[in-house]
Image (tube, rainbow, N blue to C red):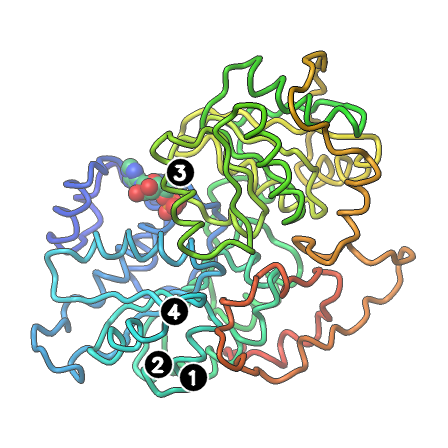
């Protein structure tokens, strides 16, 4: 595969080239120089790339290029059928992808609509009914619109599953299979995933036709340009350690990850009491609140954003200097996702993890997955806490077992035991009465990977075999 050093040599429509150059893209990123020619040829592709690698342009630009020859300037909705569908796990990621796509199609007659839950359906309905070539959607809300006949997928030429591992993690497989069943058999299919658990391989085997695998980083490898540090502390020292890292290193624009919504709220409050401009972003926050917090963070009025994994998924904050894991994630793949928020687009980043003895196994699992050791650094948790006392070990332990976990703890299973069938995957899709699929908290829909039965994947998907 040859490398492309600028956007002129792909043979992309000149309008696209002019737009991306106008956006300041001068050199294609590695995933772009590999993916763009393949997608332009109409090949199916499996992309092993994290958010922050430029993957959105990697799939969107060639798809737009392929749609342009038949793009209609007519006002008639019938002349603007849905021709490309991009599925994303969260509203935030859907918005970010759509924001980019809308910039890329500026100056062309193509239209793009975003469809996700938790907000009024009506404006989305109007956009869909007016006719739109590119739809960026979260699965549940798209099914609601399809059920209401607000749009049709019968003319889709290209479909993209973005952050496929996360969609599976969030239990979207049944919804995805229903959507794929409504697509024409003759189509181009692309899938992007940062990690490659078996479920993803099975999904790819069913959904993609002779896919080309495009990798830009070692599989499951943590980003090379991210410096990783581990701080071992006692449970009662966690907040003190966090404050030490934030203040001692003078860090600003830091994303702090926690495992539970309640922990997220509580930590943000504690940081505020300590005089730090902090806010929380989690599943109990409305879309408006999340957007506001994210904007504040991007603009620098909020220095520390405390987030759960699901809420932080796909956040596009270019060159975030540091992330801190206040809790070690339950699933090692989440660690890769979390630290992928920093050190993006070639910038170097810092990922610090605060861990207690109870989290040793989770740390070991991360090291196994990333095939590397995280450097243990000393920390002196001396600074006295003003205001509220830090959360005690027992309280934190209690939170861990509350119902609001980001995702359930992996079930305790003897080694080699057969994974139980998760009923979730066999139940038919039921649109929530009066609410939307993504309007429900994604956290509440979370399922563990180990709960999925591998064999079900093929049966559920309408994709082609090869
Ligand atoms: P993504 O991985 O698609 O979320 O992209 C991450 C960020 O990089 C986005 O803000 C893009 O606008 C930006 N970006 C993508 N491709 C390029 C490029 N070739 N040059 C500079 N910035 C880019």
Q: Residues within 10 Å of mark 3 (few under 14, many from 20)?
A: some
Frontmost residue, 231 versus 51: 231
The residue nearer to you, when weighing 337 against 143, is 143
Give the residue drawn at x 57%, y 34%. 256
The label shown at residue 159 is 4
Which residue is at the front of the view, 13 or 426? 426
Marks 4 and 3 in Cβ contact (< 8 Å):
no
Tell me the crowding category of disc 4: few under 14, some 14 to 19, or many 20 or more residues within 10 angstroms, Cα based: many
Do the residues under discs 4 and 1 have CB atoms within 8 angstroms? no
**Distance of label 3 from label 1 (alpha carbons):** 34 Å
Residue appearing at x 21%, y 68% in the figure = 67
The reply to whether residue 466 is in sight is no
Mark 2 closeness class: few <14, some 14–19, many ≥20 residues within 10 Å: some
Q: Which mark is residue 317?
A: 3
What label does residue 182 carry, if any?
1
Quick check: 24 above or below 350? Answer: below
Q: Residue furthest left?
A: 74
Q: Which residue is mark 2?
A: 153
Q: Along the polypeptide, which appears first: circle 3 or circle 1?
A: 1
């Amino acid at each position: 595969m040859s490398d492309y050093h600028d956007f002129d040599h792909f043979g992309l429509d000149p309008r696209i080239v002019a737009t991306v150059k106008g956006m300041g893209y001068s050199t294609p990123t590695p995933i772009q120089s590999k993916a763009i020619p393949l997608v332009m040829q109409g090949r199916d592709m499996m992309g092993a790339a994290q958010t922050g690698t430029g993957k959105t342009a990697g799939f969107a630009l060639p798809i737009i290029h392929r749609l342009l020859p038949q793009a209609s300037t007519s006002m008639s909705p019938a002349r603007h059928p849905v021709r490309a569908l991009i599925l994303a796990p969260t509203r935030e990621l859907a918005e970010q992808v759509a924001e980019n796509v809308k910039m890329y199609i500026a100056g062309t007659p193509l239209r793009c609509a975003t469809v996700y839950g938790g907000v009024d359906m009506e404006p989305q309905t109007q956009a869909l009914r007016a006719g739109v070539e590119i739809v960026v959607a979260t699965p549940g809300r798209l099914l609601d619109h399809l059920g209401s006949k607000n749009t049709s997928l019968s003319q889709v030429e290209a479909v993209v599953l973005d952050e496929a591992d996360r969609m599976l993690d969030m239990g979207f497989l049944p919804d995805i299979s229903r959507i794929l069943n409504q697509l024409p058999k003759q189509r181009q299919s692309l899938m992007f995933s940062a990690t490659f658990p078996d479920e993803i391989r099975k999904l790819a085997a069913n959904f993609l036709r002779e896919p080309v695998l495009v990798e830009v980083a070692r599989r499951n490898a943590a980003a090379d340009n991210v410096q990783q540090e581990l701080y071992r502390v006692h449970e009662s020292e966690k907040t003190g350690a966090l404050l030490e890292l934030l203040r001692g290193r003078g860090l600003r624009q830091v994303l702090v990850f926690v495992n539970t919504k309640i922990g997220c709220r509580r930590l943000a409050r504690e940081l505020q009491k300590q005089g730090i401009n902090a806010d929380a972003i989690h599943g109990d926050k409305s879309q408006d609140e999340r957007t506001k917090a994210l904007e504040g963070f991007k603009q620098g009025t909020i220095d520390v954003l405390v987030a759960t994994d699901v809420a932080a998924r796909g956040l596009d904050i270019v060159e975030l200097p540091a992330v801190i894991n206040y809790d070690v994630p339950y699933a090692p793949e989440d660690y890769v996702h979390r630290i992928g928020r920093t050190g993006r687009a070639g910038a170097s980043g810092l990922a610090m993890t605060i861990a207690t003895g109870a989290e040793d196994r989770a740390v070991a699992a991360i090291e196994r997955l990333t095939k590397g050791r995280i450097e243990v650094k000393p920390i002196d948790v001396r600074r006295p806490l003003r205001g509220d006392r830090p959360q005690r070990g027992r309280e934190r332990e209690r939170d861990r077992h509350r119902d609001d976990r980001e995702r359930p703890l992996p079930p305790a299973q003897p080694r080699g035991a057969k994974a139980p069938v998760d009923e979730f995957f066999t139940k038919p899709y039921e649109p929530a009465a009066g609410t939307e699929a993504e309007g429900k908290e994604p956290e509440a829909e979370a399922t563990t990977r180990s709960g999925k039965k591998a064999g079900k994947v093929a049966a559920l998907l309408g994709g082609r075999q090869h």
